[in-house]
Image (cartoon, rainbow, N blue to C red):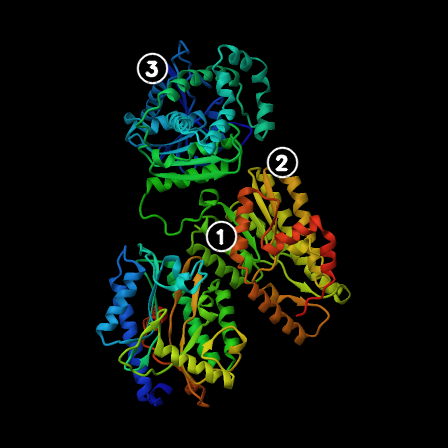
Amino acid sequence: MSGTILVGARERRVRTGGIELCVAELGEPGRPTVVLVHGYPDSKEVWSEVAERLASRFHVVLYDVRGHGRSEAPVPLRGGFTLEKLTDDFLAVVDAVSPDRPVHLVGHDWGSVQGWEFATVRRTEGRIASFTSMSGPSLDHFGHWIKQRMSRPTPRRAAQLLGQGARSWYVYMLHTPVLPELAWRGPLGKRWPRLLERGEKLPAGGGYPTASLPEDAAHGAWLYRDNVRARLRRPRADAFAHVPVQLITPTGDAFLSERLYDDLERWAPQLVRRTLPARHWIPRTRPDQLASWITEFVTATEDPGPAPASTGTGKYADRFGGQLVLVTGAASGIGRATAFAFAEAGARVVAVDRDAAGAARTAEMARLIGAPQAWGACVDVSDEQAMEKLAAQVAAEYGVVDVLVNNAGIGLSGSFLDTTSEDWKKVLDVNLWGVIHGCRIFGRQMAERGQGGHIVNTASAAAYLPSKTLPAYSTSKAAVLMLSECLRAELASKSIGVSAICPGIVNTNITATARFAGVDEAEEKRRQERSSRLYGLRNFPPEKVAEAIVEAVVHNRAVVPVTPEAKGARWISRFAPGALRALAKLEPRL
Amino acid sequence: MAGDTRQLSADLRGFKEVQQLAYACAEAVAARLKPGITEREAARMQREWLRERGVRDWFHLPFAWFGDRTAFVDFKIPLQFFPTGRRLEPGMPFILDAAPIYRGYTADIGYSGSLGLNPVQDRLMSDLREHRELILTEVRERRSLREIYEDVERLMVRQGHANRHRAYPFGVIAHKVDRVKERRWSPTVFGFGTQALKGLAGDALHGHREGWSPLWSPYKFSDHPPQPGLWAVEPHLGFRGTGAKFEEILVVTDSRDPEESAFWLDDDLPHVRRWAEERAA
């Protein structure tokens, strides 16, 4: 585990072009080979977490790029780091570790820049089976990207150019002679681990970065000096990928704009896109997600049989493919629609509800529309022990939840003086304690894993809309709203987002099951029917709320009012609260 | 059993015959659908098939919906029901809906299928079975049509589906059909046969006086027990861009015997046969 690095790796030296490379292998050699190539300033150890996770299924190969880690540096350095020479190195390693079968290539940062070269030149054809690229564009594609934007600079294109231009500051710095080497061997090298922790949110320790960092970084400056100017000035016109490519884009990358990959389909016809809310060093910060995507992609390329019947086709399939989403209150209404929306995006879904049959039905339908796996679970969210048990079971069987949607809720209407303490207890137990249990138990798992995640809590427009008819319900939802805001502040440092959704009047069965305090049973039934009919006339579909929830996760939004009336009320509550107070006194006729 | 004792009057036989004809048309056209065919072409194929077999008048001209149009996604105005240039693709769901009048008898049928495998629509079709049973049971109990409508909708929601017959004019799940006089010239207005519309309007007028409506809707004007006569019932399920429906005639009589008070005109229809196979499997 972390603490030691690359446990159980078998090492060998491979000779190429007058130098020796240090190559490490994990896993059984008979399995499909996955070659992991590191970036700058790094050594193969950047992959330790990912490699460990892949080793049980694949033959994992890592090597130190020339001049890095325990590989030898070319003499002289100038001219020793061209992409042609790096391709020689790669072929030498591949011939040594997997002489008969093509390998699956994975590159991060400069490893990915090299990877694009390997995947697009003729002489590697038949030696590579697939390529997974992270945070490293092809210099040739990059050159064309710049040329295109320079030759026809529309305002948008100019902005894209300037945006990437500003992100590339370190590339200009690295082109100055001697100074970068001095900085790396001096103060920068010393401070680098601390900078990574602070700026890039890398977990501290774990033997990374390795002691060779200052030397790696000093030598690696020649990667830039030997290639960047030449390739950007005269990009190859035939840089088409001859293998399937999986592109994993971290959306919070400080060095590379997402726009760089806009025209990538042109260069890589068999392209699968993935996005990840994270910063640049994803092999360190998101190893679970990377291992699962690499496994999925490699497996699909190895065995291309008929495409699996259920894969996400939705708009956000790149973001949620294979992720684990747990939704409470998923047997009906907004919860069910949310489960379906994530299923369409290719997520694995756990549908939780008191209604076992309804939850099972949700899971079954979710599998039909794109969820690779889906399960129903019968749990009452207000029951703490049941929730603990569920969390333990989910973690053991399906993994740590990536997105948690605390949606279960019940309705309660009636004036404050008519509401008994029993009524209060019931509504707070589900609407507030249910959310607290969910956030506490699943939130802790997310935080302990330390690889990000998202929590969505369904509050309500009633959270900021006072009314004399919904005192208990509004109180419970206002608490959920504030809980979400506080939690958002607390979990931000762990890259866990928290969103509160305020739907408004949505056509679900919450009205049909709502309790109306202070009236007899017949009157309660009549009011349930009447309010259901009114909500039916309003006819705002839960599917639209589900869409808003998915987008709230994608964009990490804090508070999301959904229906127009919810938006309007939120606006008035901020700018003319007096008006809402006056409205609150009205008694709606039911 | 009831089926043996039930004497089919000549009228019912006439309705049954045209309903069979319409379903035969739908099956024949469905078998000829290929990738690239447009909705308009599929509608024309139905029209020609039925014309060749003697149909001269229509309750409405044949419709065809492909892809997410089977679930009426983003339908705002009734004109959107008319066939478009949407082309059929492999795996796409489709619905054919025809309402021919033959020798004065009206049928109105809906046939759902897909070009190749479509597991979602397959599931929708299986789920429709419960609706056919529910409607019959509750009509026999003489519940108000509005109540039955709401119960059907509740069942749809429980199944996880959306009620898509709500998109039809007046949100109807069914409408009355009747005998129509055979004229030499029978024009259509906005796709609906004028003779049939006249019949419907007459019913509406009668019903208005007597407190019932020939349209089975979620609104107050349908808050009455089932009116004896023939009802073309069309529950329509939608699930995230895929829709499925069946449509067939339900006979309602004023008999006291529950079995005789309401029954499906014909059980030998593609969707009913399909459910029987499912049960056997």
The label nearer to you, 2 versus 1, is 1
Cα–Cα gap, marks 2 and 1: 28 Å
Say the numbered circle drawn on residue A341: 1
Q: Position of residue B218 (x, y in %)?
A: 51, 72
The one of A215 and B210 positioned closer to us in this rendering: B210
Say the numbered circle drawn on residue A493: 2
Q: Quadrant of residue A378?
A: bottom right
| Sequence-first disc among 2 and 1 | 1
Around disc 1, counting alpha carbons within 10 Å, would you say few (fewer than 14), some (14 to 19), or many (20 or more)? many
Is B3 drawn above or below residue B166 in the view shown? below
Say the numbered circle drawn on residue A17: 3
Q: Position of residue A243 (x, y in %)?
A: 32, 34
Cβ–Cβ under 8 Å for marks 3 and 1: no
Label 1 secondary element: helix
Q: Quadrant of residue B86?
A: bottom left
Q: Position of residue B171 (x, y in %)?
A: 47, 70
The label nearer to you, 3 versus 1, is 1
Q: Position of residue A73 (x, y in %)?
A: 42, 14
Is A315 drawn above or below residue A535 in the view shown? above
Q: Which chain is disc 2 placed on? A: A
| Sequence-first disc among 3 and 1 | 3
Amino acid type indicated by mark 2:
Ser
Locate the N terminus of chain B by quadrant. bottom left
Q: Which chain is disc 1 placed on? A: A
Amino acid type indicated by mark 3:
Gly
Cβ–Cβ under 8 Å for marks 3 and 2: no
Q: Which chain is disc 3 placed on? A: A
Q: Is residue B40 visible?
A: yes
Is the residue at mark 3 from the same chain as the one at mark 2? yes
